Image (cartoon, helix red, strand yellow):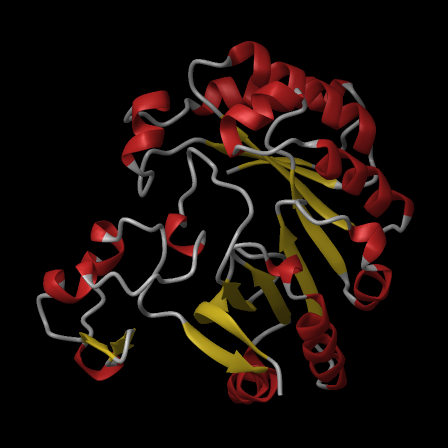
């Protein structure tokens, strides 16, 4: 029975796709985004023990080379996440499809579907396939929230099975993408074209960053020309909340102005994007 590392489950989420959704955040991501708001999902726990000493409620202990998490003692202060030197979480659990299905069943009457996010959920395609098959039997929809690091053309069965992919396009310029994420965007752009051809592009998202007007415009201009009226384009204003020190040094403790994002949204609309939203 396959089990994968799950960072957290959210029974009801109004922001992870259309409608009220059950959101699943997996652990591990091949990108290391400077402005990541979930940096604790990037790596798996190394059991270094720093969090054990920092936990104010004694909810963590190190035993047999692993960190043991006692959920009953946890008060959700996230001290463990803030002190972790490894961009991971001691709260991660390995779960099976059956265990997640059981959680979904409890809230099924109140949700439209599920969204699998991360980390990067496409790292676990066989797990997602089995989960989606079971969820669709419940009459629910299945969305994938991805940074596009894995080539979806190699995961055709999963793409056909899901109801759509919400794809991050962080930068159109490859060098800038490497600066932001430590990786090339070649596969991301390939995925953009592929998902459009399969009519499986639920939404494209780009974070609008401070201090990089030329790059913001380049990305919005090119991406909006590619997607046209075939997908929603969401422009996300950079917010410093939760961004680690490395990102704060690059972008600062600011929130991108809505009027600036509106100007970029208008550029996208001029390029044929009918459905442009700002968050």
The residue at 43%/13% (across/down) is: 211
Comparing 267 with 143, the one in front is 143
* Percent of width and height locating residue 109: 58, 84
* Residue 200 visible, this angle: no
Left or right, residue 56 beside residue 119: left
Comparing 163 with 194, the one in front is 194
Please tell me in which quadrant of the rendered image residue 65 appears: bottom left
* Percent of width and height locating residue 155: 81, 59
* Percent of width and height locating residue 113: 64, 71
| Vertical position of residue 254 compared to residue 51: above or below | above
| Vertical position of residue 108 compared to residue 6: above or below | below
Q: Quadrant of the N terminus?
A: bottom right
The residue at 76%/34% (across/down) is: 189
| Vertical position of residue 11 compared to residue 259: above or below | below
The residue at 76%/33% (across/down) is: 274
| Vertical position of residue 138 compared to residue 266: above or below | below
Residue situated furthest right in the rendering: 197
Comparing 52 with 107, the one in front is 52
The residue at 61%/56% (across/down) is: 17
Left or right, residue 246 beside residue 231: left
Count the marks. Answer: 0
* Percent of width and height locating residue 161: 82, 68
Residue situated furthest left in the rendering: 56
Please tell me in which quadrant of the rendered image residue 272 appears: top right
* Residue 252 visible, this angle: yes
Residue situated furthest top in the rendering: 214
């Amino acid at each position: 029975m396959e089990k994968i590392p799950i960072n957290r489950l959210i029974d009801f989420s109004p922001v992870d796709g259309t409608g009220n959704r059950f959101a699943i955040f997996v652990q591990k991501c091949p990108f290391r985004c400077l402005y990541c708001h979930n940096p604790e999902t990037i790596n798996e726990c190394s059991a270094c023990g720093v969090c054990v000493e920092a936990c104010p409620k004694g909810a963590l202990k190190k035993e047999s080379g692993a960190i043991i998490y006692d959920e009953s003692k946890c008060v959700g202060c996230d001290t463990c996440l803030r002190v972790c030197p490894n961009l991971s979480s001691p709260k991660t659990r390995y779960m099976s499809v059956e265990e997640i299905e059981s959680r979904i069943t409890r809230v099924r009457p109140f949700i439209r579907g599920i969204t699998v996010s991360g980390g990067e959920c496409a790292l676990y395609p066989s797990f997602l396939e089995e989960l989606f098959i079971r969820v669709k039997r419940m009459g629910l929809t299945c969305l994938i929230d991805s940074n596009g690091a894995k080539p979806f053309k190699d995961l055709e069965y999963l793409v056909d099975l899901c109801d759509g992919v919400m794809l991050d396009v962080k930068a159109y310029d490859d060098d800038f993408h490497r600066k932001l994420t430590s990786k090339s965007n070649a596969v991301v752009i390939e995925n953009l074209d592929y998902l459009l051809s399969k009519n499986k592009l639920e939404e494209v998202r780009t974070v609008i960053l401070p201090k990089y007007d030329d790059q913001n415009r380049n990305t919005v201009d090119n991406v909006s020309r590619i997607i046209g009226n075939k997908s929603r384009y969401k422009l996300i204003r950079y917010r410093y909340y939760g961004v680690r020190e490395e990102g704060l040094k690059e972008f600062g403790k600011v929130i991108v102005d809505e009027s600036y994002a509106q100007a970029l949204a208008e550029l996208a609309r001029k390029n044929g994007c009918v459905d442009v939203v700002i968050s």
